[in-house]
Amino acid sequence: MLGRVFKAYDVRGTYPDLLNDQMAWQIGFGVSRFLRGEAEAAGQTNPMMRNIVVGRDMRVSSPSLARSLISGINAQGGDVIDVGLVDTPFVTFAINHLGCAGGVMVTASHNPPQYNGFKVSRRQGKPVGEMNGLAEVRKFAAMVDTTIGRGAAGRSETRDLWEAYAHHVLRTLDLKRPLKIVIDASNGMAGAMVPKVFGKGGANVKGLTIVEVNFEHTKGNFAHEPNPLVAANLAQTQEAVRANKADFGVCFDGDADRLVVVDEKGSIIGCDHLTALLAKWFLARAPGAGIVYDLRSTKAVEEDVRAAGGTPHRCRVGHVFMKQVMAEHNCVFGGELSGHFYFRDNFFADSGAIALTTLLTVVSGQSKPLSALVAPVRRYVQSGEINFVNEEADAALDALREQFVGEADVDELDGVTIDLFRARGWWCNVRKSNTEPLLRLNVEAKDRKVLDKVLAELRPRLGRRVDH
């Protein structure tokens, strides 16, 4: 049963049929054994390395799962610092602020209310995925004798770190002129984080007015799915921006580590376009620095980073890989199409709150509205991600690769990328889903006519299209 809830990057399943309190205890035991063992192997002797940070989101099952998880960590001998109801980036902050062995966030992010799960991080808040520790956690959790006593060999304490966290986030904010913004918390953890950091309605920041949408925690239910990547879930944000004549709006996901932005007209800004805009601001302050970007991003990201004197680092999809490349190249900033934005000054990790403070700083420093600031980046046309059911995904990728080898630049950093941008005005990436028999297609072209032609050529080769 344990194997069904361990995914590529986290632990996730419906509660209580797939993921239950007993399993949470086992996973806590496994997490403690892995994180503490890793710290010991690295020669870490700081007493704080006995500690594992635990935070949770607002889901109905989260308090119970967190208690069981903490009990399992304690049973293995690990100490716990319980930071309570927080956003996921808070846990990364706490691990680094306190110097702990790692941490666990109890959350199912953007999934429906019946789901829950665990995001595990190691020292310095680095993510733990299937290929770098999560498989070991699963093994340790499966092996533990569940009949052993539940007595706490380790201890647990609660700590309120909101003041320190707010200082960490707000030090990146420099508001040059008054702004009014809309924030849709999606009935998730932004509803707790934003008032704690920015104050009710933005009261903690002079010149900032925040129009709050869906800030209530409604027993784990959501006014809309807490996934801002789905355009329909942005309708309330768009409506509120227009109704309040706001400078822009943001919609957070359930655990507030991701966001999507709409401009003052209510138009959705692609996360790759936002990456390009913010990258130029960072490069003006860190000349020649590296910028990491998701390989599905518009060509404009690479072009604008180079034009600003930076070094672009194209990266495969996934926060584990993005954070790794960020740290390896000491990059100042990174962005992913999923709405994750990464910062060197945030331990090379992602933060929805710091993405917001950076955008506030950028917009307030310009006289132009956000739509005009982004317009130069929107110079090519994109298909968006299109999904195809294909039980023979590997064969389809092989055929695609063989067709274009010798004619195009072809690479396999993540799936198959075919680049004919210079010769024919288009490029594409096709990659497999980590969890489903799907192929995901992204195409970009210099104009709509070319895009439509390429889509007509590629679609029949990839399977049956699905809206997903």
Image: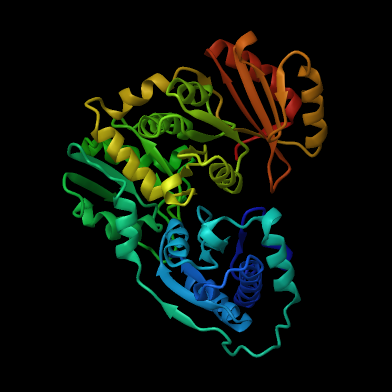
Q: Is residue 61 visible?
A: no
| Count of numbered marks | 0
* Above or below, 266 relative to 425: below
* Above or below, 94 relative to 415: below
* Above or below, 75 relative to 205: below
Which residue: 67% across, 61% down?
134
The percent position of residue 228, horizontal first and vertical second, equals: 45, 44
The percent position of residue 230, horizontal first and vertical second, equals: 49, 40
The percent position of residue 339, horizontal first and vertical second, equals: 47, 42
Residue furthest to the top: 423
Q: Which residue is at the front of the view, 199 or 162?
A: 162
Residue 319 falls left or right of residue 430: left
Q: How is the image coloured?
A: rainbow
Q: Which residue is at the front of the view, 235 or 451?
A: 451
Which corner quadrant holds the C terminus?
Answer: top right
Q: Is residue 294 visible?
A: yes
Residue 281 falls left or right of residue 70: left
* Above or below, 100 relative to 108: below
Which residue: 23% across, 57% down?
199
Which residue: 68% across, 42% down?
433
The percent position of residue 417, horizontal first and vertical second, equals: 68, 26
Which corner quadrant holds the N terminus?
Answer: bottom right
Which residue: 60% across, 82% down?
77
Q: Which residue is at the front of the view, 320 or 14?
A: 320
